[in-house]
Amino acid sequence: MNSMEISEQLLNMLRCPSCQNSLKYDSAKENLACWRCGKEYPLEDNIPRFKK
Ligand SMILES: [Zn+2]
């Protein structure tokens, strides 16, 4: 397991807290991004940190 990558299964379960859209993983930035509202969420130990 590569600890720097989030699993596709987990990614499919996650939704943007702002607009409930699906998120995509940005491997360059190592964060999650919502393509709809443009918000980015950093990953910490593979757990997304959602800030309101
Ligand atoms: Zn969003």
Image (cartoon, grey):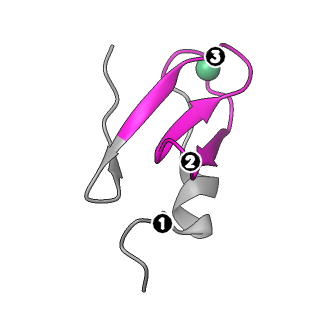
Q: Which mark is residue 38?
A: 3
Farthest residue, direction left: 45
Disc on the earlier residue, 2 or 1? 1
**Residue at which label 1 appears:** 5
Would you say the residues marked 2 and 1 are in contact, meaning their CB atoms lie under 8 Å apart? no
Does residue 11 sit above or below 31 in this rendering?
A: below
Residues under labels 2 and 1: Cα distance? Answer: 11 Å
**Lateral position of residue 44 relative to residue 5, left or right:** left
**Residue at which label 2 appears:** 28
Q: Residue at x 52, y 15 (%)?
A: 18
**Lateral position of residue 48 relative to residue 39, left or right:** left
Q: Which residues are magenta?
A: 17-42
48 or 17, which is in the foreground?
A: 48
Q: Residue at x 52, y 61 (%)?
A: 10
Membership of 48 in magenta stretch: no
Membership of 21 in magenta stretch: yes
Residues under labels 3 and 2: Cα distance? Answer: 16 Å
Callout 3: helix, strand or loop?
Answer: loop
Q: Amino acid at mark 1?
A: Glu
Residues under labels 1 and 3: Cα distance? Answer: 21 Å
- Where, quadrant-wise, is the C terminus in this rendering? top left
Callout 2: helix, strand or loop?
Answer: loop
Q: Amino acid at mark 3?
A: Gly
Q: Position of residue 8 (x, y in %)?
A: 62, 66
- Mark 3: C-beta under 8 Å from nearest atom of ligand 1: yes
Does residue 44 sit above or below 5 in this rendering?
A: above
Q: Nearer the viewer, mark 3 or mark 2?
A: 2
Q: Position of residue 42 (x, y in %)?
A: 37, 36
